[in-house]
Amino acid sequence: MSTDSQLKGHSRQRQLEKSTAYAKAHGLELADKSQLEDIGVSAFKGDNVKGGALGQFLEAVENGRVPLGSYLLVESLDRLSRQEVLKSLSLFLRIVQSGTNLVTLQDGRVYSAEHIELPELIFSLTIMSRAHEESQLKSERVGAAWANKRSQANLRPMTKLCPAWLRLAKDRSRYEEIQEKAGVVRSIFEDTAAGIGSYVITNRLNKKRVPTFGRSKFWQRSYVAKILSSRAVVGEYQPCKISAEGKREPVGRPIQDYYPRLISDELFFRARQARSQRRVDGRGRKGKYVSNLFSGIAECAYCHHPMVFENKGQKGGTFLVCSRAKRGLGCVTTRWRYDHFEASFLAFVEQLDLPTLIRDDDSKKKALDEAIQALQGELISLRDEMEKAYQLLKINSALEIVAEKLGTLQKRVQELGAQLNEKEAERQSLEATESEFYQSKAEIKSLIARLQTPGVGEGDLYKLRSQVAARIKAIVKALIVAPLGEAPRSEMLWRDMEAMADGPAELAEIAELKRTVVDTRYFGVGFANGHTLHVHPNKEDPLKFDWKTVDLMTSSGPDGELVPPPQPRR
């Protein structure tokens, strides 16, 4: 049967009744238990032979599992094939030459390799030719009807099929939101833009027992990802057609405002940028409250391998430790208490702009941050499109059209690059002129405590820490962590000096020098804008520092006074 809907009618029953009657009338045993069906499989495209039940039957015949002289009963020849005449004839001959008798129940004809005559062969060719012409005409009419629908798609919906958060209005003139589902989709995009991954989003939806959009009882990460990649949320529809291979292929340009817009372009691209950043910086579970804000960027100062988060339990505490040292591969095994490191970083890296992130009290800064994130997300999407265009150029596919599109994309990338530079310069200007917050140590302490202390809303803390982690990854290009200062790298120097010392006097001088130079732990930050920061936190109080150095030029003490930079040991 060519469509599933025929199953609800009499097509299947009619074919089975005719088969049973023929078998009874001719003393044949009907193979009920080995019955094969092609329901909703196209004979016009040959799918019933390539991957359908007819193909399985032919394979069984050729493997000898179907005895010679068996009968294949079909209602008519057009049930076997509706392809071009030569392809249909090839299939017809393949069956009868295999030793199988082919019976058409509609007219009672029997075709076999031993008794086929020229008139019968011509008759079969006529039937197969007519079947192909009918299917070809039907295909063209259906294609033309859909082409007409696509041309009118900007005026009215093409079909009732639409994204799961929409439905066709009763008058069929438009699509309308299903409020509960639309709210879920918006929250998925907002959480993603805030840095929350699909794993956590999926778990939250299941934990809250939010109804799914389909038959599945539970939300799946793959479905959340599908929603996040759908441009239907910004009202866009890409018309498609089914290719000869049965694949969906885009037809023409996307239609804007076909669906009701659910979210802004800005939010869509912010979510796109956040997802891309998670793929680069690491994915998967981040702990109950995003345990490590520096995952994927913190690096050991001594061996340049990643610094990883280590949890020694409720009594042991949490630490940042070199991944090589943790595995016993030779690096220094000294740890830095995680909560102390995090507090120092949040307190002294002013570029992070902690108050705007946590208190959300500066709409201008927040708007700039979101605009920058959206521009970065759109740039990522454009570069993906450009990569696809380059691939098409390699296979010489519609060169002029692809080259034109590529030129348009390149122009847009340049425009976005200029806008991004402008927004980032504006954001840096705000940072340079607004530093009152960092004069209040009490307020710093309060905000860090809020970020580090689980409150009533578990989800709120996760989202807040996700936002901070995303901001860190956006502004920080490199983060060097030195739990023992320069001591590990200077030990060799001291040994070399002692080996070359000329007598006890020089050894005494070296010993005195070693006592006067005190190594303190530090971290160094390389920002995406090219600036650098080195901070030596106070060992007793992580919210105080002994000194910090900006761009390796200007050093200041804990009270802001200029001091000589720390004596390096190299």
Image (cartoon, helix red, strand yellow):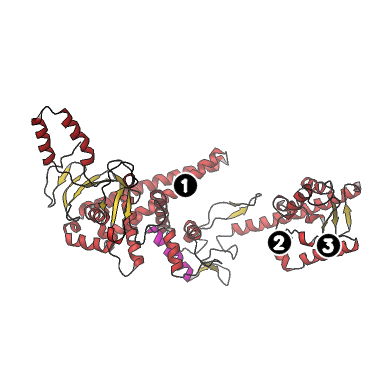
Of the pair 370 and 327, the residue shown nearer to us:
327
Q: Earlier in the sequence, mark 3 or mark 2?
A: 2
Please tell me whether mark 1 or mark 3 is closer to you in this view. 3
Q: CA distance from mark 1 to mark 3?
A: 55 Å
Q: Is residue 151 above or below residue 280?
A: below
Secondary structure type for disc 1:
helix
Position of 466 compared to 446: left or right? Answer: right
Q: Which residue is mark 3?
A: 19
Position of 483 compared to 56: left or right? Answer: left
Q: Residue 492 location, x and y as percent? A: 22, 35
Q: Is residue 37 above or below residue 480?
A: below
| Residue 444 placement: quadrant | bottom left
The amino acid sitting under disc 2 is Thr
Of the pair 9 and 179, the residue shown nearer to us:
9
Residue 263, can we see it? no
Q: Residue 121 location, x and y as percent? A: 87, 48
Q: Which residue is mark 1?
A: 384
The magenta region covers 180-193
Q: Residue 124 location, x and y as percent? A: 85, 51
Q: Earlier in the sequence, mark 1 or mark 3?
A: 3
The amino acid sitting under disc 3 is Ser
Within 10 Å of disc 3 (Cα), the crowding (few <14, some 14-19, many 20+) is: many
Q: CA distance from mark 3 to mark 2?
A: 20 Å
Secondary structure type for disc 3:
helix
Q: For the point 57% across and 42% down, which residue is it?
A: 398
Q: Which residue is mark 2?
A: 3
Position of 176 compared to 510: left or right? Answer: right
Where is the C terminus found, in terms of image quarters?
top left
Do labels 2 and 1 touch, CB within 8 Å? Answer: no
